[in-house]
Image (cartoon, rainbow, N blue to C red):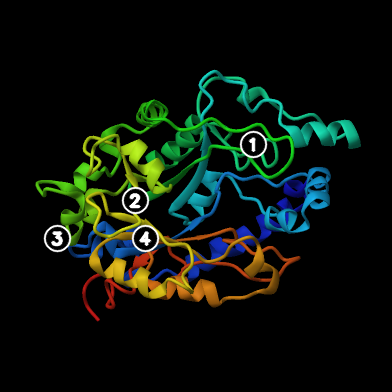
Amino acid sequence: MCSVRYALVIVVLSISFFQAIAQSSDCANQLEGPCAKQEISLRMNDLQAVGSHNSYKLAIPDTELAIISDYSEQSARSLDYSHLSLSTQLDMGLRQIELDIFHDPEGGRFADPLLPRQASETYGALPYDDSAMRHPGFKVLHSQDIDVRSTCPSWISCLIEIKRWSDSHPQHVPILIMINAKDGGSAYPGVKPALDFTTQAYRALDDETLSVFPFDRIVKPDDVRGSYRTLREAVLADNWPLLDAVRGKVLFALDETPEKVRIYMDGEPSLEGLPMFVNSIDENEEHAAYFTLNDPLRSQDQISAAVSAGFIVRTRADANTLEARINSTDRREAAFRSGAHYISTDYYVPRPEFSDYSVGLPEGVPARCNPVRLRNNCNGRP
C-alpha cells in the first residue's frame, strides 16, 4: 500500500519537523506552551495556524489507483495523497482538521465499496475491512465506492480522537473542525449515491457531535453573538471571545453551499442554539462569521478584507497535489500573506518523490499573531 510505502519517510521527516519546532520557538510569538500567557487581550481571530485538507484520508492502494487511472489519469493524480492520524497531526502543531461526512442512519451503506471489490476480484487484492462501516451513524471518507479509507472511519471515532488529544493539551488554541456534508453521486460509473442531508440528518449530526464535545468545550455562534442582534453584527464589533477564554476548545464550521447551509440553519438566521458555524457567501448575511476562500492567489484581497473586518477565514496552500509535484510556493506564500486564520495543506511534511514542498509557520509554532490583524508581536510590543 501507498501508506506503508511512505511510512518510514514520514516518520524520519516528522522527527526533523519536531526538532525544527524546538529550535525555532520564539516566546514573542508563541501562543501555546510555556510562553502562552504573554499575550494581552488577544482574541481568537487574532491568530494564524496551519491545518490539513481531508485530514482523515489514507492512501488509495496501488491496485485501486491503477483502476482510477484507467478511467481518468488526472483524477488518479489528484487523489494520490494521504495523511497521518489526527492526533499525530495535532502533535505536529496543526490546528485545523477537515472531515468529509456521509449520512448512514441504518449502517452498512458504505460497507462494500465498488473499487476495493473490483481490485479484489481482478487483482486478488486484500478484501476491504468493513467492520467500522456496519454500524449506524455518520461515516468519514472522501468519495463513496472510490476513495474510502480513513484513519477514523466514523464521525464519532474522529471526534473521540480529537477530544482525547485536546484533554491532554488544555492550553491549545481553538481547533477548527471543518465539515463537508457529502451527498449525491459520482462521475465514476457504478457509484451508489450518498444520502441527502435533511434538517433531521443535521440534527442527528449535532447530537453525535455533542455526545463527544459538550457545549462548554465548543466555541459556538451564541458565544460570539452575545447580546448583539445578529452574529454578523457581533463579528464586526470584534466580539470573538478572548483567546485565553477558549483555550482547549474546538469550533465547528459547516463548509457547504447556501442551500445546504439553509437546511442546517432551519430558520435560525444567526445560528441561535446551534453548535456549528456555517460558511458564508455574502458578508451581509446575518450568520456571517466564517468564510472558506480556498484560492489565495485569486482571492487574496478578499481574504485580507474579511480578516480585517473580523471574520474568520480558511484557505488552501495547495490543491490536487499540483504544488507539491512542481515545488510551486506562490499559492502557499499568498495564503500566509492574506491573513487567513487557518491555512490548509496536504504537505505538512514533504513527499520526497515529488519535491521538498511543505507548509508550516515560519516560526515552527502551532499558531502565531495574524499578520493582517496584528502586525506587531503577540504581546503588543513591536
Callout in the foreground (1, 3): 1
Q: Position of residue 155 (x, y in %)?
A: 49, 33
- Residue at the (83%, 44%) spot, across then down: 63
* Sequence-first tag of 4 and 1: 1
- Residue at the (37%, 68%) spot, across then down: 303
**128 to 335, vertically: above or below:** above
Task: Give the left or right position of residue 49, taking residue 74 as reference.
Answer: left
Residue type highlighted by circle 4: Val
* Sequence-first tag of 2 and 4: 2
Residue for badge 3: 237
Residue for badge 2: 174
Residue type highlighted by circle 3: Ala
**341 to 226, vertically: above or below:** below
Q: Residue furthest bottom?
A: 382
Residue for badge 1: 144
Residue type highlighted by circle 2: Pro
Q: Crowding near pointer 1: few (<14 within 10 Å), some, many (20+)?
A: many
